[in-house]
């Protein structure tokens, strides 16, 4: 990841987060038995999003990234409770569909960001541009 630009690191984090959300959605479609695994994947997606954003902005963040990861761990309980309530009230199809819709939205935003970057940047310069915090 060190050779990639700031923008491509952001896009990579977004696409990875989207893939995790999609897998969580597919697992949630199977029913309440997979709710814990689906919630765990959502927490992992949140960690990827937070750490990916921090790493894209400042590659030397180090302990700050670790603090972001530790701060997201309590999300498991909250996401499990939300998922359990949605599954109880609306069913597995709606719960899984919501997660898949979230993954599509994150992927579309990541692809849109990549397209915008390519349009604004013009021809690709040699080497990876520095992140804003490294200038």
Image (cartoon, rainbow, N blue to C red):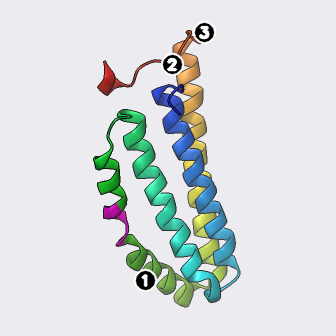
Instruction: Using the image, determine if residue 64 lies above or below residue 11.
Output: below
> Residue 81 got which mark?
1
Q: Position of residue 92 (x, y in %)?
A: 64, 82
Quadrant for the C terminus in the image: top left
Let me know if residue 72 is in the magenta part.
yes
Helix, strand or loop at mark 3:
loop
Measure the alpha-carbon separation of dots 1 and 3. Answer: 48 Å
| Residue marked by disc 2 | 128
Residue 105 visible somewhere in the drawing = no
Residue 40 visible somewhere in the drawing = yes
Q: Position of residue 67 (x, y in %)?
A: 29, 56
Q: Residue at x 53, y 23 (%)?
A: 117
Q: Residue at x 33, y 63 (%)?
A: 70
Specify the quadrant of the image occupied by residue 31. bottom right
Dot 1 crowding, Cα within 10 Å, few <14, some 14–19, many 20+: some
Measure the alpha-carbon separation of dots 3 and 2. Answer: 13 Å
Predominant secondary structure, magenta span: helix
Which span of residues is magenta-colored?
Answer: 70-74
> Residue 123 got which mark?
3
Q: Position of residue 35 (x, y in %)?
A: 57, 82
CB under 8 Å between discs 1 and 3: no
Helix, strand or loop at mark 1:
helix
CB under 8 Å between discs 3 and 2: no
> Residue 105 got which mark?
none
Let me know if residue 135 is in the magenta part.
no
Measure the alpha-carbon separation of dots 2 and 1. Answer: 42 Å
Specify the quadrant of the image occupied by residue 119. top right
């Amino acid at each position: 990841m060190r050779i990639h630009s700031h923008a491509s690191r952001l896009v990579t984090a977004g696409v990875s987060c989207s893939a995790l959300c999609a897998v969580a959605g597919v697992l949630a479609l199977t029913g309440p038995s997979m709710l814990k695994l689906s919630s765990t994947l959502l927490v992992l997606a949140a960690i990827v999003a937070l750490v990916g954003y921090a790493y894209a902005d400042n590659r030397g963040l180090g302990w700050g990234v670790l603090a972001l990861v530790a701060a997201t761990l309590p999300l498991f309980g909250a996401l499990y409770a939300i998922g359990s309530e949605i599954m109880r009230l609306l069913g597995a199809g709606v719960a899984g569909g919501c997660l898949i819709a979230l993954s599509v939205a994150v992927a579309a935003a990541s692809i849109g960001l990549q397209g915008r970057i390519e349009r604004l940047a013009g021809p690709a310069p040699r080497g990876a541009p520095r992140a804003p915090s490294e200038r």
